[in-house]
Image: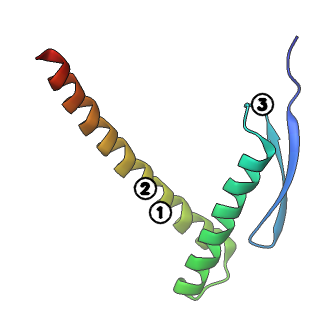
């Protein structure tokens, strides 16, 4: 039995989106993520003094990519440290 995609309506930067999920994320998790993106877009829009949603979205994407890269680097460091400890 295959699961049908679920639809969750959210609002980000004054635009409404229907998010179709095939993943096991819960509705509260999706809403929390949408709220985080909305907050980041509003912060960047205010700081950059622009309401151009495409520019703001690209800046948010760059900030999120930077955060993800930092998490990956730290994860790699911890993995390497753990492997070293386990070799002993």
Marker disc for residue 26: none
Q: Hey, which residue is sitting farthest left in the picture? A: 88
> Disc 2, disc 1: CB below 8 Å?
yes
Picture quadrant of residue 86: top left
Q: Position of residue 1 (x, y in %)?
A: 88, 10
> Disc 2, disc 3: CB below 8 Å?
no
Please tell me whether residue 52 is drawn above or below residue 15 in the rendered image. below
For marks 1 and 3, give the CA distance: 26 Å
User: Colour scheme in the image?
Assistant: rainbow
Q: Nearer the viewer, residue 42 or 30?
A: 30
Q: Position of residue 15 (x, y in %)?
A: 82, 68
> Disc 1, disc 3: CB below 8 Å?
no
Q: Position of residue 60 (x, y in %)?
A: 55, 65
- Secondary-structure class at tag 3: loop
- Residue, disc 2: 67
Q: Residue at x 58, y 78 (%)?
A: 43
* Mark positioned earlier in the residue sequence (2 or 3): 3
- Secondary-structure class at tag 1: helix
- Residue, disc 3: 22
Q: Residues within 10 Å of mark 3 (few under 14, many from 20)?
A: few
- Residue, disc 1: 63
For marks 2 and 1, give the CA distance: 6 Å
């Amino acid at each position: 039995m295959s699961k049908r995609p679920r639809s969750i309506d959210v609002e980000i930067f004054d635009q409404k989106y229907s998010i179709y999920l095939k993943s096991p994320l819960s509705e509260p998790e999706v809403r929390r993520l949408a709220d985080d993106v909305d907050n980041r877009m509003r912060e960047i829009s205010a700081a950059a003094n622009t309401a151009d949603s495409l520019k703001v979205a690209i800046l948010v994407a760059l900030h999120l990519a930077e955060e993800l890269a930092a998490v990956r680097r730290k994860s790699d460091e911890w993995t390497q440290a753990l492997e070293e400890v386990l070799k002993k």
